[in-house]
Amino acid sequence: MNTNDVEPDVRRLLELVSPKVGVIRSLTKVARGVEEPNPPVMYQAVLSHFDYRMAPQVERSAAGKGRTDSEAIRAALGEAVEHYCASHINKETTKLASREELPDAVAPPECVLYSDAQYARQKFPYHRWQPQDALTWTPMLELPTQREVFAPAQLVYLNFTAQREEDFLTAITSNGLAAGPNLEFAILNGLYESVERDGFLITWMNKLPAPGVDFSGANGLAQSIKAHYVQHGTEIRVFNVSTDIPIYVMMAVALDKTGEGPAVLVGLGCHLDPQVALTKSLLEVCQVHPGEVSRYREQPPAQRLRSYEDVRTLEDHSAFLTVPERIGECSFLLDNGRVQPIEELPNRSQGSAAADLQTCVDALMRAGCRVLYADLTTPDMADYGFRVVRTIVTGLQPIHFGYGEERLGGRRLFEVPHIMGHAAGVRGESDLNPCPHPLA
């Protein structure tokens, strides 16, 4: 790589990359075929083994995309650093106690865990929390007051290993984890990710008829991505899967029309500006498309994923609907006939991370949520200008992977369809879409 071709701040970040002594072992520009649009540019970063953990490469890989090499490198290194920082547990600040001893702590069920019916299943793997349970807690700050509260450490750190049954509350995910050049930017993007997953899952699991988005008047990058894929036999459609929370969530869907590639792929984007949310969703499709095409051809999913119950891993989720015969699982979106021009969606962004963060916090609090963050930045990464946070927004529907892993202990999943006028009343578990979601 010619470091003269990237911006000065990125040149300094490249000091992190070394096969011998780097926090990041390698950084590679992703080769993409002619069927993929350019821009965006893609890079992959692979973390070194750290903290004496011999983690598999899939856990250490990070991808980044952008309009330029600098943007894509910055994104890939940022995601790698995000994973690195979130895997270092600050044991000096964790505390073993019951919530009865920490009355201001966030009770685990506030973070949406499981329903009575799920806990009653034979061999259900997760512990059902009780107020008297001694739990490992870690401090977070609540917005907007910056008051310190405690939250379950398992919901904050990526590599938290539950040594005690009481700490094994759920599967670990990266939900609400984000990195950025400053604290406000990182927190805002962590919140965007949480809102994004909430809107997507509520829509998918309830088969809500989210309107399509006509983006013929959108920015040039969005148009060029769509036109390029259409030229190569892939239709691009976008749906507004926002909920009662006034923050836009867009879901881009790539539909293969050639019969030779994955039938359905999705990408998500979230922002106060609908045009930015739209572009983010399209860029995510660009990021996942090459890998899914390769996997579709090398590991045909029709033979190994025959039923919903076969969906176990993150990769299984995106692969299941790539089988052409399963495109009907998306008919509630593809065939509902509702379309809204993107120009009719008001831009709620004020153009700065600090102002937009306040807007998002206000919106989430009006929805009855508590907004928390933990600054996980390690000192070595702070020297390079990174800030890494884990955000938690109570009540929002979190992502899950694996059939039967759905977190059904919250209220929004069942109440929002009624709030939005899509259901006559509050829904129940038997009303939910049994098809696993297609997000990887």
Image (spheres, grey):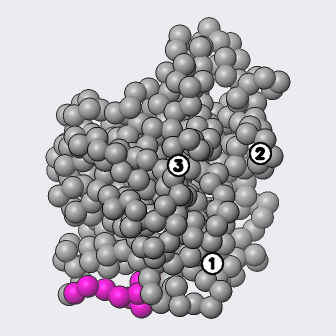
- In the rendered image, the quadrant that contains the N terminus is top right
In magenta, the rendered stretch is 425-433
Position of residue 396 relative to residue 413, above or below, is above
* Of residues 70 and 374, the one drawn nearer to the viewer in this rendering: 374
Residue at image coords 49%, 55%: 137
Q: Quadrant of residue 162?
A: bottom right
Return the residue at label 1.
125
Return the residue at label 2.
53
* Image location of residue 351, percent across then percent down: 24, 31
Return the residue at label 3.
94
Task: Determine the CA span between mark 1 and mark 3.
Answer: 24 Å
Circle 3: element type? loop
Circle 1: element type? loop
- In the rendered image, the quadrant that contains the C terminus is bottom right
- Assign the magenta stretch its main secondary structure: loop
If you read the primary sequence from the N terminus, does the residue marked by circle 1 or circle 2 appear first? 2
Using a 10 Å C-alpha cutoff, classify the residue at mark 3 as few (fewer than 14 neighbours), some (14 to 19) or many (20 or more).
some
Q: Quadrant of residue 259?
A: bottom right
* Image location of residue 185, percent across then percent down: 37, 33
- Inspect the image, locate mark 3, and give the three-letter code of the amino acid beneath it: Thr
Q: Nearer the viewer, mark 1 or mark 3?
A: 3
* Of residues 121 and 128, the one drawn nearer to the viewer in this rendering: 128
